[in-house]
Image (cartoon, helix red, strand yellow):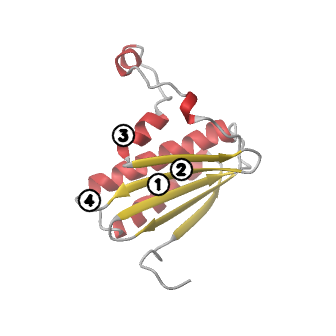
Amino acid sequence: MGNSIKNNLKEIKVSSKTENLSKIRDFVGANASTAGVSQSTVENIVLAVDEACTNIIKHAYKSSPDGEIIIQIEYDESRLTITIIDYGKSFEPERIPQPDLRKYYNERKVGGLGMYLMKSLMDDVKYTSIPGKYNQVLLSKNLRGS
């Protein structure tokens, strides 16, 4: 493998405890900042990753603290990509209905907007699941013009 510009890969591994979410937020915030994006974009990226990791803890690991979450951040001059890997239960994003935001607001629901929120905060969201092996969420943000 030759040296490419995409060698800015940073990684953190944490156990699936909600108290590790602040560690994840700090890691993502610090590394997204070094990619040269605006503060508001950094906040959006942190929020999207936080949402993804909260979903992993709650759903993939059913709130068990023994799971592992791996977060990788990689960027070049045009794109920042965050890869989140877990080994918990997989889910099918296409089975999640598009939320009715007015109804949601009127009923004052909390939670459940994860995929919708991630897609609105990021430029690209891809979910891959290899049942019985691992799940991977790819969150990308275009850096040109951000």
Residue in view at x 52 percent, y 44 percent? 52
Residue 25 image label: 1
Give the labeled residue for mark 2: 21
Residue in view at x 72 percent, y 42 percent? 64
Q: As shown in the figure, which amino acid type bears the numbered disc 1?
A: Arg
Q: As shown in the figure, which amino acid type bears the numbered disc 4?
A: Ser
- Where residue 141 sits in the image (x, y, percent)? 37, 55
Q: As shown in the figure, which amino acid type bears the numbered disc 2?
A: Leu
Badge nearest the viewer, 4 or 1: 4
Give the labeled residue for mark 4: 38
Q: Quadrant of the N terminus?
A: bottom right
Residue 120 image label: 3
> Rounded to the nearest whole Å, what is the CA distance between mark 2 and mark 1?
6 Å
Labels 2 and 1 touching (C-beta < 8 A): yes
Q: Secondary structure at mark 3?
A: helix
Badge 4 or badge 1: first in the primary sequence: 1
Badge 1 or badge 3: first in the primary sequence: 1
> Rounded to the nearest whole Å, what is the CA distance between mark 4 and mark 2?
22 Å
Badge 2 or badge 3: first in the primary sequence: 2
Q: Is residue 66 left or right of residue 95?
A: right
Q: Quadrant of the C terminus?
A: bottom left
Q: As shown in the figure, which amino acid type bears the numbered disc 3?
A: Ser
Toward the bottom, the furthest residue is: 2
